[in-house]
Image: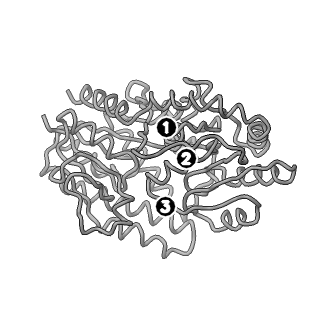
Amino acid sequence: MTSVAVFHPGLQHAHQLAWALHEHGLLQTFWSGVPLSGTGASSIMPAHIRDKLRSTTIPPALRRHPVWWQVLLRARSLARSAQTQHDYTHRVFHWFDWWVSRHVQALKPRAVVGYENSSYYTFMAARSIGAVCILDAPSLHHEQAKHLIDVPSNGYIDEINRRKDREVEMADLLITCSDMARDSYVNAGVAAGKVKSILLGAELPVGVARPRESERPVQFIFAGTLSSRKSIDLILDAFARLNIEGHRADLTLVGGTEEGQWLTKARQIPHVRHCPNVPQAQLYQLFAQADCLLLPSRFDAFGMVVVEAMATGTPAIVSTMTGAREIISMFPDSGWVVEPTAESIFRCMEDKVMNRQAISTASPYALKAAGHFTWRAYRERVANLIAETVE
């Protein structure tokens, strides 16, 4: 029975969840602000854009990707401050939520899957027709998050958090992407029985190959937004100290930045290079060419790049505040867990430079861990959970 509607103003992993429902005959429709490639992909789309699209087998007839939402989101670059950009982005999410809610009664789904901070009006409309409300919350509860990092805002953050709380109240099921994230909701008073944790996954694209080991310096890689939440300042401090103390290594930073200061600082440190956002297949190849991934975030509800790097055989250094540490808990030899401090990160990186064999030993375990956390496995787990909830 095709009875579940999925709505997301961006993408994140929503296409994998919608794909899971389609594979199990449960998907009624999937709306997102980001287009996908696959069946029916436009051949007139420029190649440099088409190469960055995520693929899916969900037929175009079941998908809707309003391009104007991308235009609205990209307009945030016109804002002159991080606070204004933050608030504007979330206002766009709220506009998407309101727009979707205008269509829910006509669609009459049996269940709605909405995403954190974009389901306030959608869930109210869904409840008015007796539909099940499922909230996918890819971050920590905002009460815990605010103790870990300052959020730039001109005051709209209070409205954002009010809506988040109401979404959680209206949800019949809340899905998080790690036990750490689940615990943050339970600790905030959400009933434990309605919060379920399902770790995300990754799958290696065809043609990605890991080069043979050589005598080159150890290659560290970071992938994600260059931000203090991801501890980019701590990573750069630790790597600069490696240089000062005479250790030879290379660091590749992949991704955009919220604040130009991090790129300025990176350019001042020897053996650091920066790559802007790259297509997914190219990112996997960069992971394969690296020796060790760095994700010692101040907080990260999961950290999908950890599984993606491990899928190429590259082990990871993650922090105690990263949900992906659960992968290393299950596969202890696949990486290393550190505190999100410059000293702890430096000591772990220094050990890998001085004891390169540790990386070689961890590589096959990283591959084994990634084999457990595939997108196929995620789709099976999440589809079964939603089917059970709906039925």
Q: Nearer the viewer, residue 64 or 290?
A: 290
Q: Residue at 58% of width from left, 28% of height from top?
A: 328
Q: Residue at 45% of width from left, 66% of height from top?
A: 88
The residue indicated by pointer 2 is: 287
The residue indicated by pointer 1 is: 311
Q: Is residue 16 left or right of residue 320?
A: left
Residue 68: percent from the left, percent from the top? 30, 68
Mark 3 / mark 2, whichever is N-terminal: 3
- Give, as a three-letter code, the residue at label 1: Ala
Q: Residue at 33% of width from left, 37% of height from top?
A: 171
User: Farthest residue toward the right?
Assistant: 245
Residue 191: percent from the left, percent from the top? 42, 28
Query: Is disc 1 in contact with disc 2, using a CB cutoff of under 8 Å?
Result: yes
Residue 62: percent from the left, percent from the top? 17, 50
Residue 77: percent from the left, percent from the top? 49, 72
Relative vertical location of residue 67 with respect to residue 134 in this rendering, above or below: below
Labels 1, 3: front one: 1
Q: Does dot 3 land on a helix, a strand or a loop?
A: loop
Q: Nearer the viewer, residue 370 or 109?
A: 370
- Give, as a three-letter code, the residue at label 3: Tyr
Distance from label 3 to label 2 (Cα)? 37 Å
> Where is the N terminus found, in terms of image quarters?
top left
Q: Does dot 1 land on a helix, a strand or a loop?
A: loop
Q: Residues within 10 Å of mark 1 (few under 14, many from 20)?
A: many
Mark 1 / mark 3, whichever is N-terminal: 3
Distance from label 1 to label 3 (Cα)? 39 Å
- Give, as a three-letter code, the residue at label 2: Phe
Relative vertical location of residue 183 with respect to residue 44 in this rendering, above or below: above
Relative vertical location of residue 58 with respect to residue 310 in this rendering, above or below: below
Q: Residues within 10 Å of mark 3 (few under 14, many from 20)?
A: some
Q: Is residue 330 left or right of residue 33?
A: right
